[in-house]
Amino acid sequence: MKRVSRRQLIGSAAALGVAALGGCARERSALRLWAMGREGEVVGELLHDFRREHPGIAVQVEQLPWTAAHEKLLTAFAGDATPDVAQLGNTWLPEFVALGALEPLDARVAASRTLDRADYFDGIWATNVIDGTLYGLPWYVDTRLLFYRRDLLAQAGFAQPPQSWPEWLAMLQALKRRAGADKYAVLLPLNEYDPLVALALQQEEPLLRDHASYGNFRSAGFRRTLDFYLSMYTQQLAPPATNNEVANLWNEFARGYFSFYISGPWQIGEFRRRLPAELQGAWATAPLPGPTGPGASVAGGSSLGVFKRSKRKDEAWALVEFLSRPATQQRFRALTGNLPPRRSAWAEPALVADVPSQAFRDQLERVKPVPQAPEWERIATELRLVLEKVVRGDIAAAEMPAEMDRRADRLLEKRRWMLARAGAAR
């Protein structure tokens, strides 16, 4: 999922178009589908076949900017004006479930002739399951892994990317020795929390405990992750900088300012467009290493949810089923570059032949959801802020776990109250 500020509102939603299949009465009863960003721009192109299969269902697509989408959805819920179907970032799902806004989908999936639970990546599917109930279907997926300079790694004496933290650390140290004082081995921007969260998810202990009502940053697992992560700064393997302080990420990667970078699938296209031709064979992707072997990463992306207030749930579900077909997902990937959540959709020849994308296919077998609490994004922002203070020397590293628990517990106070009320009611 693309992360945006919830407070920003940019303009009003722009209607992409209405499938005019009849008079005004039909147009007023069209299914309303809300989609964000590039997805909202192109989803209309997928609907021609849907209209042929369902000539009695008109679909109105509204494109929302990511910066306004969350607030618009909340406003629509408060005003009893939610769409029938909407694209939802995976980290938004717990919030709309807590509001009672989404329709449970387990029975519909069980009755479907086209959906196969086993065809979805487990960790991605799990992001849509709240308290044992399914509330969304994955539409496209996102995760984080390694982008690296394999030519520089080979020059340092390594033929393969790392499989474990000790191997990775040894590679980073070797790269730093060759790079010298003015260059680094890895870029871990201080204004991004995703790399630290991804490595923390590799531990057995959850980041939040007791039904995600308290912070769990003082756990042994998070402390191990933090020690490893901070070692990359203390050993000067990573620059203590935000990505805003790096003049141009792709130029700096090209000149060897750093050799490893943790990022998502959109970077494949950026590296192909922005790196010079002579370096196109010099970079590669690889799954994240874990403490002792191949590691997990973040289960991200967007899902499709049916709103409980929809008066046309059967037709809304027909649209969700259509958009979830492997063939439709393959067309969607061709239009957007987004990666499909169903394993069978990865059989597309273009994806099979795309070596950088195949590392994501491998990583998607080992992804985990972030904590399923509406407050998680705010907690993750606090994690980023505290990490920067630690790296810059404003907070002692030993104090960070307790400080994060204090901040998380404060943000989760209302959640604990709501859980206590729900328990008393039972």
Image (cartoon, rainbow, N blue to C red):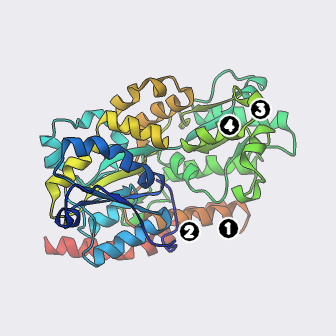
The one of 27 and 41 positioned closer to us in this rendering: 27
In this picture, residue 323 sits left or right of residue 1: left
Q: Are marks 1 and 2 in contact (CB under 8 Å)?
A: yes
Residue under numbered circle 2: 403
Residue under numbered circle 4: 169
- Say what amino acid the circle numbered 3 marks: Ala
Q: Are marks 3 and 2 in contact (CB under 8 Å)?
A: no
CA distance for labels 4 and 2: 27 Å
Q: Position of residue 218 (x, y in %)?
A: 50, 59
Residue under numbered circle 3: 174
In this picture, residue 402 sits left or right of residue 314: right
CA distance for labels 1 and 4: 24 Å
- Say what amino acid the circle numbered 2 marks: Glu
- Say what amino acid the circle numbered 4 marks: Leu
Instruction: Name the residue at 53% across, 46% down.
Output: 199
Instruction: Name the residue at 19% across, 56% down.
Output: 104
Q: Secondary structure at mark 1?
A: loop
